[in-house]
Amino acid sequence: MINWLIGVFVNTVLLMAIDGYFDSIQFSGIGAAFIASMILSILNVVVRPVLILLTLPVTILTLGLFLFVINAITLLMTAALMGNAFEIDGFGTALLASIVLSFFHLLVQKAIIEPLLQK
């Protein structure tokens, strides 16, 4: 449970940072980013495995790069569920944001969180 909360917090911070760098992604506030992070984590548990299973041949052919497309789809689904509180202008923006989010989440996880949890 604590790992999930840490992941939600990291996603919230990263989503707010992405909001600051991309003009085509907008949150109504930090609360909206936190709720979006929780919705995104739930979609990653429920919907993402189904999408991965359905697109397995394409994912294998692209050597796993299609997973960024799946991440972009879940990000767009999160924006659709949030309504006006979280807006993404298009699929290209969602794809770029999913790549940035995945990279920095991995970086924070490996460089900061895992060393702290091992102590």
Image (cartoon, rainbow, N blue to C red):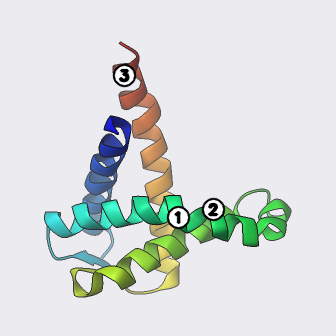
Apparent side of residue 63 relative to residue 71 in the rendered image (left or right): right
Mark 1 or mark 3: whose residue is earlier in sequence: 1
Residue underneath mark 1: 46
**x, y percent for residue 56:** 79, 65
Q: Residue at x 26, y 77 (%)?
A: 26
Residue 54 disc label = none
**x, y percent for residue 36:** 30, 67
**x, y percent for residue 102:** 49, 53
> Element type at marker 1?
helix
> Element type at marker 3?
helix
Asked whether the beta carbons under mark 1 and mark 3 sit within 8 Å of each other, the answer is no
Residue underneath mark 2: 49
Q: Of tags 2 and 3, which is closer to the observer?
A: 2
Query: Given the image, on which type of amino acid does mark 1 rest?
Result: Val
Mark 2 or mark 3: whose residue is earlier in sequence: 2
Q: Quadrant of residue 17?
A: bottom left
The one nearer the camera, 43 or 118, is 43
Query: Given the image, on which type of amino acid does mark 2 rest?
Result: Pro
Pointer 1 local density, CA inside 10 Å: few below 14, some 14–19, many at least 20: few
Residue underneath mark 3: 117
Look at the image and tell me whether residue 95 can be seen: no
Q: Quadrant of the N terminus?
A: top left
> Element type at marker 2?
helix
Pointer 2 local density, CA inside 10 Å: few below 14, some 14–19, many at least 20: few
Q: Quadrant of the C terminus?
A: top left
Asked whether the beta carbons under mark 1 and mark 2 sit within 8 Å of each other, the answer is yes
Q: Residue at x 50, y 71 (%)?
A: 74
The one nearer the camera, 21 or 69, is 69
Q: Quadrant of residue 47?
A: bottom right
Q: CA distance from mark 1 to mark 3?
A: 26 Å
Apparent side of residue 21 relative to residue 108 in the rendered image (left or right): left
Q: CA distance from mark 2 to mark 3?
A: 27 Å
